[in-house]
Image (tube, rainbow, N blue to C red):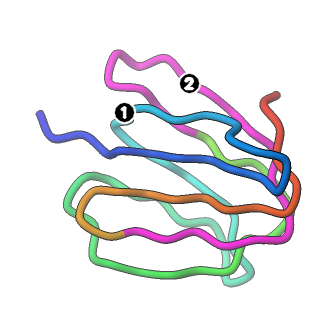
């Protein structure tokens, strides 16, 4: 099964990094879900949750604000001015 390599970072440092089955984030244009094989994209984050579903089904949630989300080659980078695990 293909997975995503996800990195959530804030201005203070790394918040969470690991493999995931899916990432859902809130952008200024609405909520977006990213699965393995997603087209490359760049989006501006809106203040809200970034939800990461791990391959086993466990979920990790972070609050993020002031940043962007980048997707390319099954790599997802969430770069936020402020981010913390919930």
Which quadrant of the figure contains the C terminus?
Answer: top right
How many numbered marks, from 0 up? Answer: 2
- Find the magenta span and give its range: 52-71
74 with respect to 15 (left or right)? left
The residue at 40%/68% (across/down) is: 71
Which quadrant of the figure contains the N terminus?
Answer: top left
Q: Position of residue 16 (x, y in %)?
A: 61, 34
Q: Find out whether residue 70 is within the magenta segment.
A: yes
Relative to residue 28, is residue 76 depicted above or below? above
Q: Of 63 and 30, which appears nearest the observer?
A: 63
Mark 1 surroundings: few (<14), some (14-19) or many (≥20) residues within 10 A? some
27 with respect to 64 (left or right)? left
Relative to residue 78, is residue 46 depicted above or below? below
Q: Of 48 and 70, which appears nearest the observer?
A: 70
- Tell me the tag on residue 82: none
Predominant SS along the magenta part: strand
The residue at 28%/66% (across/down) is: 38
Secondary structure beneath dot 1 equals strand
Mark 1 to mark 2 CA distance (whole Å): 12 Å
Q: Position of residue 46 (x, y in %)?
A: 80, 71
Q: Which residue is mark 1?
A: 19
Q: Which residue is mark 2?
A: 59
Secondary structure beneath dot 2 equals strand
6 with respect to 46 (left or right)? left
The residue at 74%/81% (across/down) is: 28
Q: Position of residue 67 (x, y in %)?
A: 75, 71
Q: Find out whether residue 58 is within the magenta segment.
A: yes
């Amino acid at each position: 099964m293909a997975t995503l390599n996800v990195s959530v970072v804030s201005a203070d440092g790394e918040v969470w990094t690991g493999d995931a089955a899916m990432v859902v984030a809130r952008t200024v244009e609405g909520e977006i879900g990213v699965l393995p094989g997603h087209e490359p994209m760049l989006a501006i984050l809106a203040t809200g949750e970034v939800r990461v579903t791990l391959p086993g089904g466990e979920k990790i949630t972070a609050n993020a604000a002031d940043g962007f989300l980048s997707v390319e080659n099954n790599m997802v980078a969430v770069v936020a001015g402020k981010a913390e695990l919930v």
